[in-house]
Amino acid sequence: MAGKTTDRKGKSKEVKSATNELADNLATFTLPDSLPCSEVEFPVLIKKTTKANWQQILEESNQKLLDIEKYKESKKECVPRAPFLRTENDYIKNEVFVHLIPALEETLNKAKMWEALVLQKCFFNGIDHIAQLLWNNNPRYPERKIKDLHIFNMPWVRRYLKEKPRPFYPKSWLWPENYAATLIQKTVRQYFVQREDEVQEMREFWRKLEMERSMPDMDTNPFLAKKFASEPNFRKN
């Protein structure tokens, strides 16, 4: 019995000392002003697993089937048709559209660049551009592709325009809007400046001086000099 009581007393002393140390630690503990993000445990959002998108699965399967069909067709050997089985559609598809479709695509890109699809009147002529592309990219004449002539520099076009010349394009077709606006503003400002009296007087002075220099008999003919000085709008006959 004596041994048990001593053990209990020793344990109680240890518990008291541990509680005292814990109380001291709690009394001296202070929270820091800020904690680094690495020490803060944020709540984790649990995302729900989405269900299978059948539309996407079908599209992927169809795409795979198309790839398989293309691969099969690429492995097939082309069997040439007999001449009596060839049709006009085959000729157009294999001989005409091969050169015409790229020319049309490039012409549409040029038309977008020149805004020919937006503006009613434009400098860009689609028919001329198609003719230029087809003539330069003719497979029977590979040297034309190297020269890459503009349509108005082609010999047959020059001959045709000599016989049947085209009318000149108006300025509204040739000038872009920014350049036309600048030119109109310049002309209007020039008109209002030239209307001023001082500018008119200066222009009249230089006009008379130029006329006087061009008339050598001004010094020898007093009548002509008097008439020249009296009339503001004097003109040489």
Image (cartoon, rainbow, N blue to C red):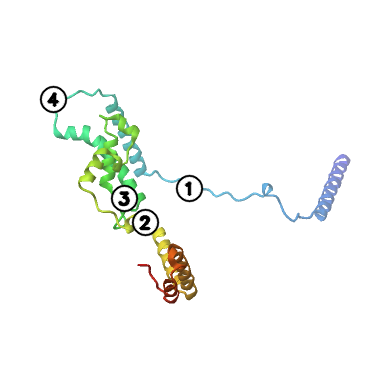
Give the residue number, with chain letter if any, for mark 3: 124
Instruction: Tell me the mark number nearer the camera, choosing from 2 and 4.
Output: 2
Residue lying at 25% horizontally and 22% vertically, measured from the top left: 77
Q: Which quarter shows the C terminus?
A: bottom left
- Give the residue type that dot 1 points to: Lys
Q: Is residue 204 above or below residue 32?
A: below
Secondary structure of the residue carrying tag 1 is loop
Density class for disc 1 (Cα within 10 Å; few <14, some 14-19, many ≥20) is few
Q: CA distance from mark 2 to mark 4?
A: 54 Å
Secondary structure of the residue carrying tag 4 is helix
Q: Earlier in the sequence, mark 3 or mark 2?
A: 3
Give the residue number, with chain letter if any, for mark 2: 175
* Front residue (pair 147, 50): 147
Please state the horizontal and vertical placement of residue 176, each as a whole percent of the image.
38, 56
Instruction: Tell me the mark number nearer the camera, choosing from 3 and 2.
Output: 2
Q: CA distance from mark 1 to mark 4?
A: 65 Å
Secondary structure of the residue carrying tag 3 is loop
Label at residue 83: 4
Q: Do residues under tags 3 and 2 come within 8 Å of each other at their CB atoms?
A: no
Q: Which quarter shows the N terminus?
A: top right
Q: CA distance from mark 2 to mark 1?
A: 62 Å
